Image (cartoon, rainbow, N blue to C red):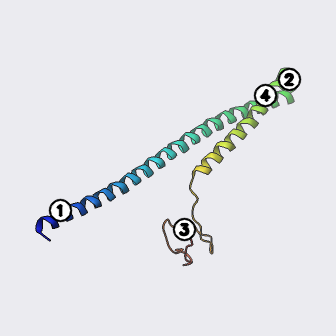
Amino acid sequence: MGFIQKMAESAKHLGNQAKDLSGIAGDKARDISKKSSELFEVTKLKYEIKKMEREMENNLAGIGALYYQQQSGMDDVSLGEELSRLLSDTRELEKQMKELEKQIEDMQPEVPVCSDCGKVLPAGGKFCSFCGKQVVE
């Protein structure tokens, strides 16, 4: 085999390796992009939950004030209607918040736990770092 043929085969081999590396890099880039969009979505959901929590706090303060007014003898029909509305709105907020929390939970990857000792396992480990049991995948 001549020198030029060896150089051509070496160049072809390097080209194949570069192609393989670019495929791996592309896969990693897609993984990072997916993880960042999931993180953005989780952050957005958490922001919505915080807004609902503030609204719920306002509702609860209003419920307390209306209840106090009722107990103080200011039992007006409109107080009862407003109290019922706030209670209904608060229940609906609780339900919506639970749904958002479930969505967030579903988006989070499950943390691996040792089947023997119950401790959280490090990512990619072959053995539990606490009890030494082999991790079954």
Viewer-nearest of labels 2 and 4?
4
Residue in the picture at 74% in, 35% down: 92
Mark-to-mark CA distance, 3 and 2:
60 Å
Mark-to-mark CA distance, 1 and 3:
48 Å
Helix, strand or loop for disc 2: loop
Mark 3 Cα within 10 Å, few/some/many (few <14, many 20+)?
some
In this rendering, the answer to whether 17 lies above or below 96 is below
Mark-to-mark CA distance, 2 and 4:
18 Å
Three-letter code for the amino acid on which mark 2 is drawn: Met
Q: Is residue 7 left or right of residue 129?
A: left
Among numbered discs 4 and 1, the one appearing first in the sequence: 1
Viewer-nearest of labels 2 and 1?
1
Among numbered discs 1 and 3, the one appearing first in the sequence: 1
Three-letter code for the amino acid on which mark 4 is drawn: Arg
Residue in the picture at 57% in, 72% down: 136
Residue in the picture at 71% in, 36% down: 93
Among numbered discs 2 and 4, the one appearing first in the sequence: 2
**Quarter placement of the C terminus:** bottom right
What percent of the width, then of the height, locates residue 55? 66, 33
- Residue farthest left in this picture: 3
**Disc 2 to disc 4: CB gap under 8 Å:** no
Viewer-nearest of labels 1 and 3?
1
Residue 135 or residue 122, whichever sits in front:
135
Question: Which residue is tagged 1?
Answer: 8
Question: Which residue is tagged 3?
Answer: 121
| Residue 44 in which image quadrant | top right
Residue 26's tag is none
Question: Which residue is tagged 4?
Answer: 85
Helix, strand or loop for disc 4: helix
Question: Which residue is tagged 2?
Answer: 74
